[in-house]
Image (cartoon, grey):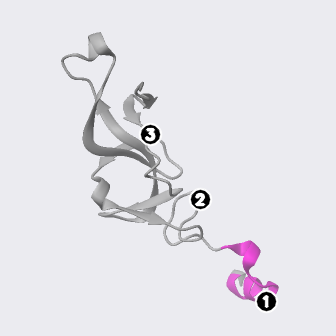
């Protein structure tokens, strides 16, 4: 079986279907949601000849709304449900869902 190697901002990673949530909370990073790219990959002494990279024990993630890659321990990830974070900026808890507020509540909040 051929290894799936992808690159994002100079970070090599291998996607994994085990990370199926759209976003995750990362321990120590309160208030922001992250998207999982996959397992970080690193070359070993044979990669030049085999083309196969070694998985590290870290997962490559990036903040929702940003493209900087962070490496985290997979045990520090907690899946988030829709509505628990803003899908545009990644804020936890989610930004106000203006479209779901009643007209009266919206007017009260805006005053």
* Residue annotated with mark 1: 104
In the image, residue 41 lies at what x, y percent? 31, 32
The segment highlighted magenta reads 97-109
Could you tell whether 67 is left or right of 77 in the image? right
Q: Looking at the image, which residue is at 42% across and 28% down?
A: 5
The image shows residue 50, relative to residue 3, as above or below, that is above
In the rendered structure, which disc, 3 or 1, sits on the residue that comes first in sequence? 3
* Residue annotated with mark 2: 87
Could you tell whether 33 is left or right of 82 in the image? left
Q: Looking at the image, which residue is at 52% across and 59% down?
A: 90
* Residue at the top extreme, as displayed: 49
Q: Is residue 25 magenta?
A: no
The image shows residue 59, relative to residue 80, as above or below, that is above
Secondary structure type for disc 1: helix
Q: Are marks 2 and 1 in contact (CB under 8 Å)?
A: no
Q: Residue 65, labelled with which disc?
A: none
The main secondary structure of the magenta stretch is helix
Q: Looking at the image, which residue is at 27% across and 52% down?
A: 73
Secondary structure type for disc 2: loop
Which residue occupies the foreground of this view, 107 or 46? 46
Q: Residue 15, labelled with which disc?
A: 3
In the image, residue 103 lies at what x, y percent? 81, 84
Work out how far the residue at label 3 is from the one at label 1, CA to CA, in angstroms: 45 Å
Q: Are marks 2 and 3 in contact (CB under 8 Å)?
A: no
The quadrant holding residue 108 is: bottom right
* Residue at the left extreme, as displayed: 45
Circle 1 packing at 10 Å, graded few (<14), some (14-19), many (20+), is: few
């Amino acid at each position: 079986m051929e290894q799936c190697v992808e690159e994002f901002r100079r970070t090599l990673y291998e996607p994994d279907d085990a990370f199926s949530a759209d976003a995750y909370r990362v321990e120590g990073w309160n208030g922001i949601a992250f998207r999982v790219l996959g397992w970080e990959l690193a070359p070993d002494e044979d990669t030049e000849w085999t083309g196969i990279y070694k998985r590290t024990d870290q997962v490559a993630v990036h903040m929702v709304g940003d493209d900087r890659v962070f490496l985290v321990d997979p045990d520090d990830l907690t899946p988030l449900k829709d509505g628990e974070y803003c899908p545009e900026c990644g804020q936890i808890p989610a930004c106000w869902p203006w479209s779901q507020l009643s007209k009266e509540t919206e007017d009260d909040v805006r005053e």
